[in-house]
Amino acid sequence: MLRSITDLLRLASMLLLGLHCYIYCYGSLHELGATSEILNKFLFKIGTHPAINNQLYLKGSVLGLLILALAGIRGKKM
């Protein structure tokens, strides 16, 4: 049970990190033609949320989720 929760936290942090890279590297991605119209519409709808709009909040939430995921992992016994 705990393993699936930590996997979910890791997945959420990776999705937020990908979202962060997409938002702040949008100009370069648009020039390369690597943008998606569906993703653009989705981001336009949630773009007014303070956690997405502020760069520090987004990075902090990714870091917080990764710390929670790391806290749930047990080390290997030798």
Image: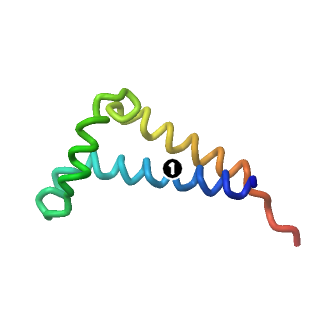
Return the residue found at the far bottom: 78
Name which residue lies at 14% across and 63% down. Answer: 33
Residue 61 relative to residue 37: left or right = right
Q: Residue 21, image x and y in percent?
A: 33, 51
Color scheme of the displayed model: rainbow
- The number of numbered badges drawn on the structure is 1
Q: Residue 39, image x and y in percent?
A: 26, 51
Q: Is residue 59 above or below residue 31?
A: above
Return the residue found at the far right: 78
| Residue pointed to by mark 1 | 13
Residue 10 relative to residue 78: left or right = left
Front residue (pair 66, 9): 9
Q: Quadrant of residue 56?
A: top left
Q: Residue 10, image x and y in percent?
A: 57, 54
Name which residue lies at 65% across and 50% down. Answer: 69
Name which residue lies at 21% across and 47% down. Answer: 40
Q: Quadrant of residue 78?
A: bottom right
Residue 51 relative to residue 27: left or right = right
Crowdedness of circle 1 by 10 Å Cα count: few (<14), some, many (20+)? many
Q: Is residue 48 above or below residue 26?
A: above
Three-letter amino acid code at the position of disc 1: Ser
User: Which quarter of the rendered picture does the N terminus lie within?
Assistant: bottom right
Q: Residue 27, image x and y in percent?
A: 16, 51
